[in-house]
Image: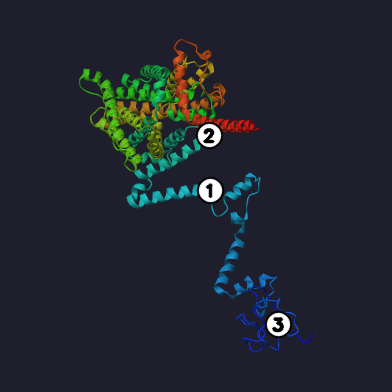
Amino acid sequence: MGGNCVSTSYSTKEPAPEPATPAQTPTTDKPGQISKNGKGWGHDTSMCPDDPGYPPDSPGAEKELEWDGLQMGMNEHGSYMVLDKEEPELYNPPSRLRDENETEENGLCKRCKDSFERSFRPCLAKHNRLSQNPTCCQRFRYMFLCPPHGVLSRWLTLGLIAFLIWAVLWSITGSETLPGGNLFGLYVLIVCCFMGGWLIAKIYLPPLLGMLIAGFLLKNIPVINVAADIYPSWSMALRNIALVVILVKAGIGINATALKRLSGVCFRLAVFPCTLEACLVAAMAYGIIDFAWDWAFMLGFVIAAVSPAVVVPSMLLLQEKGYGTRKGIPTLAIASASCENVYAISAHGIVLGISFSTGNLIFNIFRGPLEMIIGVTFGVVAGLILWYIPDVKQSAIAWKRFLLVLCGGLFALFGSKVIEFPGAGALGCLILAFVAAQGWQRNKEPVKKLVGIVWIFFEPILFGLIGAEVTLEYLNPSLIGFGILIIGVGVTFRVAIAGISVQWAGLNFKERLFIALAWLPKATVQAAIGGIALDEARRLGAGEEAERQGEQLLTLAVLSIVITAPIGAIAIALGGPKFLQKSSGESDSGITEDHLSAAGSKKDVEACKEADAELQSPVEEKQGNSQENGKALTSEGDGQKSDQATEV
């Protein structure tokens, strides 16, 4: 229509009022804008009067018009302009422009950072990721990229912790933690035993074997013989403390229910092989190595005990896989191993008390049974006290029970030496933990975990110091040769008697052979009580001959560990899947009458079945609950179907 018009935009909100007369026409603040009072239009000559939407003088055009306005902004060149709504990135200046407006210092830091990343990019792990199928060389190269990560990071962390602990000890004790000092030798021994145990565990052998080897090397290699700087009094005290820890751990772990139900076959398997081997070893030691009878029987009961450190973890692994669980073979082996340890430690304590006793002969004859009575009495009374003290409503009850049972065991061991009844200490400590655990029942697990944590620290101390007690000057070829002969003959008869002991337990020939092979390894008891006789000889000043026999006894105990522990662990690991039947999920319960081979076998087999069923009860309860839930759902669905059929 004639002239240029300013484009406007309108929106409909409320009905507009009647067209205003010229006298009532409101004015606006600015030309070309609509008045905000909502009652009329502002008249301006710059507006187009010929615009069909201006003014809304028709009755049907009841609209209120608003002005959207124009949005201004800065473009990439720094000039103001009307912004295009189709390109929102033009609303704000680009990031490059903002960075240029920052301070020069920030720009310099950014350039330095970029330059550093470009220079060290080949050494950074985030810029050199591994492919899906990397080669060994690629993995090895990636392991050393920065920052430290993976295995290298873990080892650096452990190394830094070890260094800081040594630094703290050095800042407190000074020269004692420098080379040649007592604490330095002890600290290096503990660290090396940890590493030795970790390496041996990688080839599925007991970690204590690596700890014994580490202790032996640190004592006998001239350049690194730091274990020779450890004070004998410190060594003896630490070994006794570690002995208390392992006895408490063993006592809490005894399964009283399985022990009661498997009493017949468990008694035969725990007593007969140990007694025969101890007597045979004692006779050969008396005739070949010129041991006195008391020292010979101490050697016999030290060597004759089976090792729970090898047997128990191996049996638990087989039980998890289902081997032998149908007849309760893992339960039988674990319970019998614990009972045999109690029997061997008690017998060794009795002979030890007789050996170092002086005075009246009649008193010395009854000294052994008296020490057993003292140990059992102390353990039972102290264990019953721990049933009620502390009471269950106290806070941190697990820690309090742990401290009480550990301190009670330490008092039993060291106090028995004060009253000159050393054989009662170890037995009293073991009975104390066992009786206390029966009162705690299921609440014993937190205490057991705490003892296990403490044992992680004392395990390398015990086995490392035991290995350090074996010196090359006492390892003459004749002693090693006779020792291998004695250990070999004793183990041979032990394996045979173990197989005969389970003859009436409803097991076939392969299962009896497996039990016999599982009764071969020696480790824990030999390392725990092998040095007690030597410590007593040194403490009492029994003379050079007694110390010589004590060192030979300890050497033969370590030799039995080195020979039998790897062979026994390998025999259990390989013989379990080969000789034992793997139970399926449907037939893990008892056995048939065809397995009963003698008159007394049914009772033993039923005991094995009940004990094994008790160990598997949590799994069976879960399975039973799931089956019951399935049946309930099925019955509910059937009921709904029947109701629908009735309605039809």
Side of 327 relative to 550 (left or right): right
Q: Earlier in the sequence, mark 3 or mark 2?
A: 3
Disc 3 to disc 1, how far (Cα)? 83 Å
The residue closer to the viewer here, 593 or 481, is: 593
Q: Image quadrant for the C terminus?
A: top right
Side of 358 relative to 155 (left or right): left
Classify 373 as above or below 21.
Answer: above
* Residue type, mark 3 in image: Pro
Residue 624: where, in percent of width, then height?
52, 29
Q: Residue at x 50, y 47 (%)?
A: 154
Secondary structure of residue under mark 3: loop
Q: Earlier in the sequence, mark 1 or mark 2?
A: 1
Q: Is residue 538 visible?
A: no
Residue 593: where, in percent of width, then height?
52, 13
Classify 449 as above or below 51.
Answer: above
Tag on residue 55? 3
Q: Which residue ends up furthest to the right in the rendered image?
A: 1
* Residue type, mark 1 in image: Leu
Q: Which residue is mark 1?
A: 152
* Residue type, mark 2 in image: Ile
Q: Which residue is mark 2?
A: 203
Secondary structure of residue under mark 2: loop
Residue 255: where, in percent of width, then height?
40, 27
Q: Nearer the viewer, mark 3 or mark 1?
A: 3
